[in-house]
Image (spheres, rainbow, N blue to C red):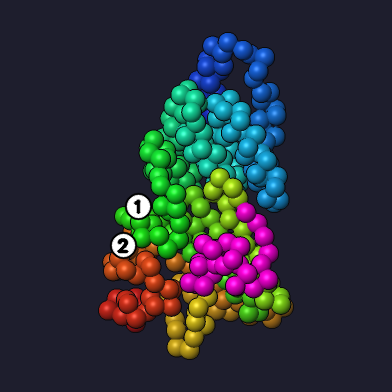
């Protein structure tokens, strides 16, 4: 079935389903207008972090009434809206309200089986989180550097770009996304989303970043330490000139459990710096 047809069928089914739920509510006056919910959903793709956070809070407060609009956005929105819509559904799947929790989990299950890869993958991640399974994880279980973060279900995607010597590092691990952008004069802009309290700030330097956001500081150190050293090369790195003569470098790597880009590696590699990959995978043909 084509994606467009699946999206229409899914949206229709989910709308009818939630219509039946809302008719059964004892207090219809308390319901939120669909137009307002649609407006909040559209704000999930807003370029301003504060607006995205505000919309997310409103949608979570709306509960099960927001689920149909979130489901449609997860199938038909742009990439940013898709990710944020699924993330909100993941939080609704942890709701204390039984109806909301069950409805969100069923919706995520349906989305995980959709023909749209980005939607399906994001929904699967949301379904596989510890909290979505009804288990309250200990604080910091998924933080970078934690010994438990390297378990078999860990999926870390790292993207690094370099324009005129200023790097931008994007690290995605589960629902947590950290973006670190080097600015002139040694400053670093950090943005962390996917957690209960998204953060955006500008640090004076790497040391200041460590003090303000220890986890982000650790990631910055991990993926910048000696990365530009002589004789170092990795598959997936591309070098070239951007428009206007700007020197650019881009790289991408995905780490899943004990494998890297589908190739076996030692579990200890997950805790090491990116610059150690070549030495630790010297027997891998791709690293020659």
Q: x, y percentage for residue 286?
A: 34, 75
| Callout 2 touching callout 1 (CB < 8 Å) | no
Q: Give how far across and how far down residue 131 sits, in percent.
A: 42, 40
- Whether 165 is drawn above or below 199: the answer is below
Residue 141: within the magenta?
no
Residue plotted at (51% across, 67% down): 219
Quarter placement of the N terminus: top left
In the image, residue 80 lies at what x, y percent? 60, 49
The vertical placement of 1 against 142, above or below, is above
Q: List the residue tagged with mark 1.
A: 153
Give the residue number, with chain letter if any, for mark 2. Answer: 258
Relative to 256, 157 lies left or right:
right
Crowding around mark 1 (Cα neighbors within 10 Å: few <14, some 14 to 19, many 20+) is: some
Q: What's drawn in magenta, residue-wise?
A: 199-223
Quadrant for the C terminus, please.
Answer: bottom left
Instruction: Locate residue 271: give its quadrant.
Output: bottom left
> Tag 2: Cα neighbours inside 10 Å, few (<14), some, or many (≥20)?
many
Front residue of 70 and 131: 131
Residue at point 54%, 72% (across, down): 250
- Can you name the residue that lies furthest to the front here? 211
């Amino acid at each position: 079935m084509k994606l467009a047809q699946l999206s229409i069928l899914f949206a229709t089914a989910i709308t009818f389903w939630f219509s039946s739920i809302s008719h059964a509510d004892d207090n219809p006056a308390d319901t939120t207008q669909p137009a307002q919910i649609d407006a909040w959903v559209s704000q999930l793709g807003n370029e301003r972090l504060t607006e995205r956070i505000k919309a997310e809070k409103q949608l979570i407060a709306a509960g099960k009434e927001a689920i149909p609009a979130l489901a449609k956005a997860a199938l038909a929105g742009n990439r940013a809206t898709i990710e944020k819509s699924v993330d909100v559904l993941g939080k609704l799947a942890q709701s204390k309200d039984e109806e909301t929790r069950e409805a969100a989990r069923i919706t995520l299950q349906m989305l995980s089986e959709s023909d749209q890869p980005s939607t399906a993958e994001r929904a699967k991640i949301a379904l596989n989180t510890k909290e979505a399974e009804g288990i309250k994880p200990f604080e910091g279980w998924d933080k970078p550097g934690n010994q438990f973060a390297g378990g078999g279900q860990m999926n870390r995607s790292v993207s690094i770009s370099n324009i005129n010597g200023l790097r931008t590092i994007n690290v995605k691990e589960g629902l947590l996304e950290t973006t670190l952008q080097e600015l002139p004069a040694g400053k670093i802009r950090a943005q962390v989303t996917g957690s209960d309290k998204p953060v955006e700030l500008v640090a004076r330097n790497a040391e200041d970043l460590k003090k303000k956001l220890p986890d982000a500081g650790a990631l910055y150190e991990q993926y910048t330490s000696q990365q530009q050293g002589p004789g170092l090369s990795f598959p997936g790195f591309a070098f070239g000139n951007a428009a206007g003569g700007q020197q650019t470098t881009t790289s991408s790597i995905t780490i899943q459990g004990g494998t890297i880009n589908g190739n076996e590696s030692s579990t200890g590699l997950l805790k090491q710096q990116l610059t150690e990959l070549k030495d630790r995978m010297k027997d891998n043909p791709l690293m020659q």
